[in-house]
Image (cartoon, rainbow, N blue to C red):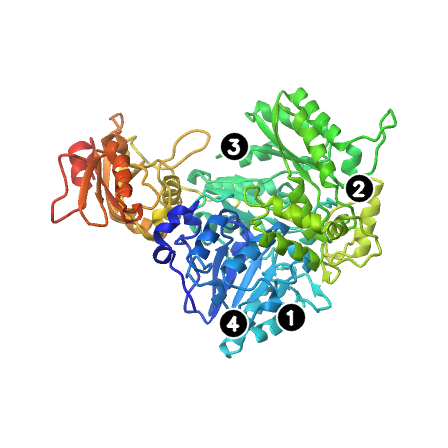
Amino acid sequence: MIYIDPIKDIGQSLLEVDKPNRYTGGEHGRLAKRDSPLQTLIAFPDLYEIGMSNQAFRIIYNGLNRIQGISCDRAFAPAPDFENLLKEKKLPLYGLDTGISLKSLDVLLFTLGYELGISGILSMLDVSGIPLRSADRSGDDPLIIIGGPAVSNPLPYSNFIDAFWIGEAEHGAYGGFFELAKEFLEIKQKGLGKKALLEKAIEHPSVWAVGKEKAIRAVNTLFSKPDDNFSVYPVASMKTVQHHGILEIMRGCPNNCRFCHAGYWYRPARQKSIETLIREAGAFINLGGYREISLSSLSSGDYCGIEELIDSLNERYSKKHISFQLPSLKVSSFALSLLEKVSRTRKSGLTFAVETPLDFWQMSINKQVTEDSIVKILKEAKKNGWRMAKFYFMIGLPLPEIKGADNETIQEEIEIVNFINNISEKTSMRFNINVGIFVPKPHTPYQWAKQIDSSLAASKLEYIRSRLRGHKVSVSEPLISMIEGIFSRGNAGAGDLAEQSFRLGSRLDAWNEYISKEAWNNVLEENAKLAEEFLSAKDLETTLPWMPIISGVSASYLKKELENSNVSVMSPGCKEVCVRRCGACKGQGTGDTNKVEKGSMALARPESIGNGDTYRVLFCFTKEGSAVFHGHLSLIEIFSMAMTRAEIEVRYTEGFNPLAKLEIVAPLSVGISSSAEIAAADFDHTFPPDEFMEKMNVNLPQGIKITRAECFRIEHGSKKHSLSSLLWGFAYSGSDNEIVYMPAKEEKEFRKKYIESGKTVFSLRRAGVFSKNILPSPANPWLSYFDALRHIFTADKI
């Protein structure tokens, strides 16, 4: 097996790429093991900060690592600069926990949440030395399996992937993916190889592969059952797109929005009990260190008992400065009292997913968001301190044609502008507006619809943007939506287009800064007929590429919903008792009842007892190995989360967004190691330094260790010196081991000259110096800065 150590094997060159800590690992909560018989890896085909925010990714990672004998490492798509660096150094992509190369794995897993991730898959395979196409691989290459909602139509990816897991991983009528993984382990322990693994996978009813007649979507029927196996780890050491705990309160959606792929794919709607969610929240806080938790689902306001849930969470955790967020609320389930509960610690934003502005069109998509109801909510919200709201719209929905008074067809872009202007005038508010392009999805009533032409979409978006100048407007890129549509309803030919654009240099196609629009335009121009075939309307009796995938929702139900859409007739969604069978719940309904006495799960926490004095714990810490790539803001977050995990009740700032009272004396440039960085945290009570060090060190990521701590009392009313105001300068040691002392104001110039002399910043090592009068002795080359502080700091040592 090949293993990569990024610090040793790449070293100084990591400083040449953007955000090098994407690639160095070392986070708190790493679970993969080198010595396990079955080596797997879960790969997310996008950047680290996207993948580490994905809860499906965490579920697979934690679930596989809980199985004795299986290791599941993790990897993310490299940005182009790092991909080029790996190729330049002839190194493969590797797992962040163990360093195992992707080519050395037994099983390589991908989770694909959106179609444009195909470019990330291709780049991860290519830079790992794994042939892109399954037909070109040998028995020495890993078995490659992919899952996720984007493979509800697996055909576009079928030339590159060996097998497809269809549905949810945790459980299923035929056994979940983790049960299949245990069978893989048995095969590996018998000494059998990739062929036997693939044969076992294809036997499973929820696995599809080329040549197999059908696969049945796996549904986790135990989702609502109590489960203490929480998917918290690992915890990112850098800010991710959603840097908070994801508390999945409900899977599926009780609504029946006809455009929503997730709403159909994750049927039936299921929800967890309040008791289970409180335990899970505790895991994200106490194990993960998160102080912001998202109550995640497709429609969180429809959770039965949502206000009781938030009341219970607040009563238990608000004194620990934990906040809870709802991603979005349906207007019909919107209550300002609910927002007030969610915003008890931090005030969250107001989001309205309107989709389309006219009532008749909303009935067509089976959703109602009236202008009057939004105005009423916004006026009340404004009285309570909200000043901004966000709106989501889509253009290109297959809506019935409406004629105006002049017998002209009413245009959606004009109505969107009128809708926003009317609400803005009535509320005197300005809004953030996001306008997307509708992409028809498989297994929905609109799977037969034509996708809007890119040039028409561009003109509609430009109209909206040009006439809503008083608001912040962001719109979709027509080319990217077109590519998404090709993969949504294409066949293996769509994968050929992806491979062509990849070989022409396109990367991470969901990102404007990385996609090669020139490459894609050339490919689409050369294959215009094929692209048009994928984007065009489908005959209701046509055999569609994704027909081998049995989603659980019947084709007859989808056709009836399409008929209702065409005449703007609304249909009921999922109910506790099934009223209109689609096939997903087999007539059982959601079964959602959550009667909980308010406050029954509250936890009484003792109030902090203090005399007004501040107790400041000063501590020294190392920053070495993979940790040298953490920036200053990342360090603040790392220590703050570690204190939450350690249950160390630090003081918090007052105001809109409470933060831990934590100070690191001076930002250390990325790439420089340190044996004596200096920081302090404030408390309402004395805190034993040894206990502080012990609790913190087991909760810090690799490369960061507290080596000394002391506690000082600052009397109420006396001056509180900041660390930076007391700092004299730094001690530096370079590759020649000579120690240089310099005032803080000369530090940047010193580093510049050091580099100009031909040496590398990567070889520098720093320690803080708090007094020009007390320098290290030859016997102790690194300053005992606490000795200096006793001469400066106006405090009593505890």
Q: Nearer the viewer, mark 4 or mark 1?
A: 4
Please identify the quarter of the rendering in which residue 222 is found: bottom right
Which one is earlier in the sequence, the residue at label 2 or at label 3? Answer: 3
Q: Nearer the viewer, mark 3 or mark 1?
A: 1
Which one is earlier in the sequence, the residue at label 4 or at label 1? Answer: 4
- Label 1 neighbour load within 10 Å: few <14, some 14-19, many 20+: some
Numbered badge on residue 570: 2
Q: CA distance from mark 4 to mark 2?
A: 54 Å
- Quarter of the image with the N terminus in it: bottom left
The answer to whether residue 237 of the structure is visible from this angle is no
Q: In the rendered structure, are the residues bearing label 1 and label 2 in contact, judged by CB atoms less than 8 Å apart? A: no
- Label 2 neighbour load within 10 Å: few <14, some 14-19, many 20+: some
Residue on which disc 4 sits: 140
Residue on which disc 3 sits: 347
- Label 3 neighbour load within 10 Å: few <14, some 14-19, many 20+: some
Task: For mark 3, give the secondary structure.
Answer: loop
Residue 734 location (% of width, % of height): 23, 47
Q: Is residue 169 left or right of residue 730?
A: right
Residue on which disc 1 sits: 202
Q: Amino acid at mark 2?
A: Met
Q: Amino acid at mark 1?
A: Ile
Task: For mark 4, give the secondary structure.
Answer: loop
Which one is earlier in the sequence, the residue at label 3 or at label 1? Answer: 1
Task: For mark 1, give the secondary structure.
Answer: helix
Q: Is residue 549 left or right of residue 767?
A: right
Q: Amino acid at mark 4?
A: Asp
Task: For mark 2, give the secondary structure.
Answer: loop
Q: In the rendered structure, are the residues bearing label 4 and label 2 in contact, judged by CB atoms less than 8 Å apart? A: no
* Residue drawn at point x = 40 percent, y = 46 percent: 16
Q: Nearer the viewer, mark 1 or mark 2?
A: 1
Residue 775 location (% of width, % of height): 14, 40
Q: CA distance from mark 1 to mark 2?
A: 40 Å
